[in-house]
Amino acid sequence: MPDWVAILPAVNASLNALATVLLLTGYVLIKRRRPKQHAYAMISAFTTSVVFLICYLVYHAALHHYTGLSGKKFVGTGLIRPIYFTILISHVLLAVPVAFMALVTLLRAWRQDWVAHRRLARITFPIWVYVSVTGVIIYGLLYHWPISAG
């Protein structure tokens, strides 16, 4: 497998971490009544998440092309195994709808429909943060912390 493929999981985790920082920054900025800076942070978070999705899809396609595998197997045993799969399943189930929710939330802001934007953002934001944070945790468990816990 080429080095450029092997490095993509770390790139993806970094993009998820960056998205988390941008989301939290955007939250602080709107609470401080700095809507222009909030908008920049949230557009940056969305862009970062889109780049993550592209890199994620490229990684899995390349991994399959070069190795025939669809993904990396989790090798942890013991208590960590059900914890990992609980995090993974919740992450996957929430990642799909939050992508659309984030887009609609941004579109409502673009149209300056602030009531609808705020209503959806209150739901979208915590899910988006959860998906970003758990993406980093999943990477860590898969690539750096394959531990046995009894």
Image (spheres, rainbow, N blue to C red):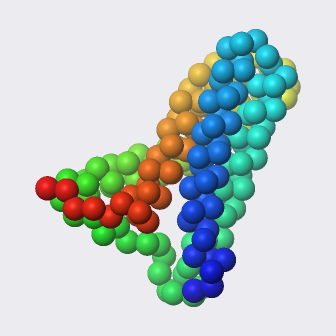
The answer to whether residue 69 of the structure is visible from this angle is: yes
Q: In this view, does 40 lie to the left or right of 11?
A: right
- The residue under the point 43% across, 72% down is 72
- The residue under the point 33% across, 49% down is 86
From this view, report whether residue 107 is shown above or below residue 115: below
- The residue under the point 66% across, 77% down is 4
Counting every numbered tag in the picture gives 0
Q: Is residue 105 left or right of residue 84?
A: right
Q: Which of 121 and 16 is in front in this view?
A: 16
The image quadrant where one finds the C terminus is: bottom left
* Percent coordinates x, y for residue 91 in the rendering: 46, 48
Seen as rendered, the residue at the extreme left is 150
- The residue under the point 65% across, 33% down is 23
- Residue 104: name its quadrant: top right
Q: Which of 62 and 96 is in front in this view?
A: 62
* Percent coordinates x, y for residue 73 in the rendering: 37, 71
From this view, report whether residue 147 is shown above or below residue 37: below
- Residue 44: name its quadrant: top right
* Percent coordinates x, y for residue 69 in the rendering: 47, 81
The answer to whether residue 57 of the structure is visible from this angle is: no
From this view, report whether residue 108 is shown above or below residue 75: above
From this view, report whether residue 86 is shown above or below residue 110: below
* Percent coordinates x, y for residue 81 in the rendering: 26, 58
The image quadrant where one finds the N terminus is: bottom right
